[in-house]
Amino acid sequence: MAAVALLLILVFAILLVLDVPIAVAIAVASFVAMLADGADPSVMLAQKMANGVNSFALLAIPFFILSGHLMGRGGMARRLMELAGALVGFLPGGLAYVNTLTCMLFGSISGSAAAAVSSVGGFMIPEMNRAGYNREFNVAVTTTAATTGLLIPPSNIMIVYSVAAGSVSIAAMFMAGVFPGIITGLFIMAVCGYFAFRHDYPTMPRSSLRQILVAFKRSFLSLFMVVLVIGGILKGVFTATEAAAIAVVYSLLLAVGLYREIRVRELPEILLQTGITTSVVMLLIGASSAMSWIMTVANIPQSVSAGLLGLSHNPVVVLLLINLLLLAVGTFMDMTPAVLIFTPIFLPVAQSLGMHPVHFGMVMIANLCIGLCTPPVGTCLFIGCGVGQTTIAKVSRTMLPFFAAMIAALMLITYLPSVSLWLPVETHQLKRTEVEQSRFMSSVPASHEEDPVVQP
């Protein structure tokens, strides 16, 4: 089995170096490893890929993707900018705060970091340029703030993690992301404040209470989608998949019917973009499922778990090592395959330390969000540089304080479980983890003879 594991890793690494598309690299590496293991890869690979996408929960992804496209082009971003400007624009460097808060609000209704960069950045970056802000700073703010949309619900990557982890509740993941997303946004705002003080960036006129109320009224229907989706799931009115379909109908009514920002003849193009994005995501999920199976056969998760716990039984040290490994992974692998491949490897280690799978999911997502802003495969960074008409080399130095802020937020999310588990989502399930959480933060090593796994 060691030879199969080594061959799998070697082929995958070679294909990545050759710049082969990530889904193809995963599938080919899995094919070669299955062949070396003695299985019939022509049958087994197809079977595992089909089983990987054969999940009811995954039906929510194309609906949320379509909803995000409709929200991005339907005038919601502009209305959220007006609200953010009325709330925080008067602060020093006000446009930077407006940019960050708008990305957080827009991310919460679209669930897409890339959509936030293009929609919010397409307006805010030129506006900040005209106001005298540094161009590279503007791109850095937009790029990093957009990732909060993957932490604040609803979020497609949370659905992917729920499927990869097994029986983790999507509703629990959605609510667990509220505080981590807000905390990350506040840390980014702190960096904006530092730059504003250092470079004496301008402020916007203070809005009156009436102006704030008018801005809130204009954006209320856009914000209400979050209440509709999350509230409906928590109250048991509909499932996460049904909520995604309702989000599409709601955003369609707003964008086409009420706001009239999207014309009916534009819908086929939006549907085509949604289909393309969905096919890419599903191909990644299917290929990653096949790789997860062959990794399990090759005992890779067990070997990694034994290796990490062999280095230390201290939860603080082990989780620091996991975070470092995921940070390295995020620099060269997209978020979806990283979650699908490394969840089966690291989740058992975290659970052996008494860590709740919902908490670990938030740690993993917060960690991999940083990879979206780093070269060589940082999707948000590429889009931000394109929108801001600058280069990665120029932006990278300005990004460093923002990386530090995101890592500081990650450490807070990692070592304070209550940040993710405080909200009373499925309280009867989360209460069962109090003993495990206390042991997780203690210095007493967890016994390998016990089974601390708690299924939410």
Image (cartoon, rainbow, N blue to C red):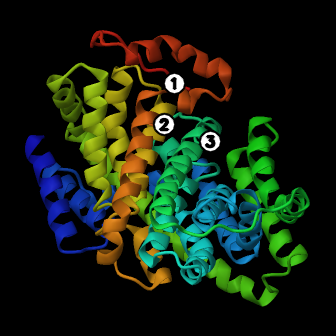
Mark 1: few, some, or many residues within 10 Å (few <14, many ≥20)?
some
Quarter of the image that includes the C terminus: top right
Q: Earlier in the sequence, mark 3 or mark 1?
A: 3
Relative to 47, 141 lies left or right:
right
Q: Nearer the viewer, residue 129 or 395?
A: 129
The amino acid type, in three-letter code, at marker 1 is Gln
Does 441 sit left or right of 200 as displayed? left
User: Quick one: SS at disc 2?
Assistant: loop
Pinpoint residue 301: horizontal percent, then vertical percent. 26, 36
- Whether pointer 1 and pointer 2 mark residues with C-beta atoms closer than 8 Å, the reply is yes
Mark 3 vs mark 2, CA separation in Å: 22 Å
Is 332 located above or below residue 348 in the figure? Answer: below
Which residue bears the numbered disc 2?
Answer: 166
Q: Residues within 10 Å of mark 3 (few under 14, many from 20)?
A: many
Identify the residue at the far left of this view: 3
* Image position, residue 444 (x, y; %): 30, 9
Asked if the residues shown at circle 3 and circle 1 are in contact, with their CB atoms under 8 angstroms apart, the answer is no
Separation (CA) of disc 3 from disc 1: 21 Å
Q: Looking at the rendering, which quadrant does residue 245 occupy?
A: bottom right
